Image (tube, rainbow, N blue to C red):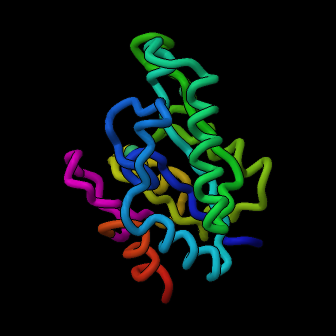
Amino acid sequence: MEKYLILDRDGVLIKDKGYVHKIKDLELLPGVVEGLQKFRDAGYKFIVISNQAGIARGLYTRRDAERFNNKLKAILASDGIVLEKFYYCEHHPDINGRCNCRKPATGLVTKAVEEFEINLSDACFIGDKDCDIELGKNCGGITVLIDSGQYPNSVQPDFKAKNLEHAFELLKNR
Ligand SMILES: [Mg+2]
Ligand SMILES: [Zn+2]
C-alpha cells in the first residue's frame, strides 16, 4: 500500500487569508514545494481535505472553489507534485445542520479510502487547526500540526512543524 498525506489546504499549502477563493489570493506557503517533493521522493501520495463553509455562507460557489483548487493543482504539477484529489465540505452547521463531512467528522476520509488504497494507521494528517488534528486522531493516523500561530491549539498532535519541509524532517525516520 502507498503512504498518504492527508493535507489541509488553508494554512498548510496556501496562506490562510480567510475564505480564500480568488486566484489572485493564492499564495503558496514557504517550504510547501520543497516539502512535498521530499515526501513524494520518499513514496508518499497526497490527498487534500478542506472545510469550505464559504460555499454554505454564499461567499463563493462550488465552481469558484473547484477553479481555485484546479489552479493550485496546476501550480504544484509544474513542480512535479501530484495532488491526487481534493475533497471539501461545503456545509456550515448553522446553515445546513450537522453533516458527516465537516472536519473533524470523518466522512471525506471514508470517501477517500473508497477511492484510494489508503492505510489510515500509516497516513499522516497535516493541518493548522484543532479540527485537523482531531480528524487524524478520529481516523487513527499520525498527526502533524503546522503551527502558524494564527489559531489557538488545544489538541495535542504527534508532531509540531513550522512548515511542510520541517514536517518531512520530523516524519522521515519514523
Ligand atoms: Mg487550515
Ligand atoms: Zn459537510
Q: Position of residue 117 (x, y in %)?
A: 78, 61
Judged from this view, the residue extending furthest toward the front is 24
Magenta-span inclusion, residue 124: no
Left or right: 26 as drawn, with respect to 43: left
Give the magenta-colored segment's residue range. 143-159
In which quadrant of this rendering is ligand 1 seen? top left
Q: Where is residue 130 in the image (x, y as percent from the top left)?
A: 33, 47
Left or right: 160 as drawn, with respect to 168: left
Q: Position of residue 58 (x, y in %)?
A: 47, 12
Q: Nearer the viewer, residue 53 or 75?
A: 75
Q: Is residue 37 above or below residue 144?
A: below
Q: In this view, does 77 lie above or below 43?
A: above
Q: Is residue 146 above or below residue 48?
A: below
Magenta-span inclusion, residue 145: yes
Q: Which residue is drawn at 44% across and 22% down?
A: 54
Q: Which residue is drawn at 57% across and 42% down?
A: 106
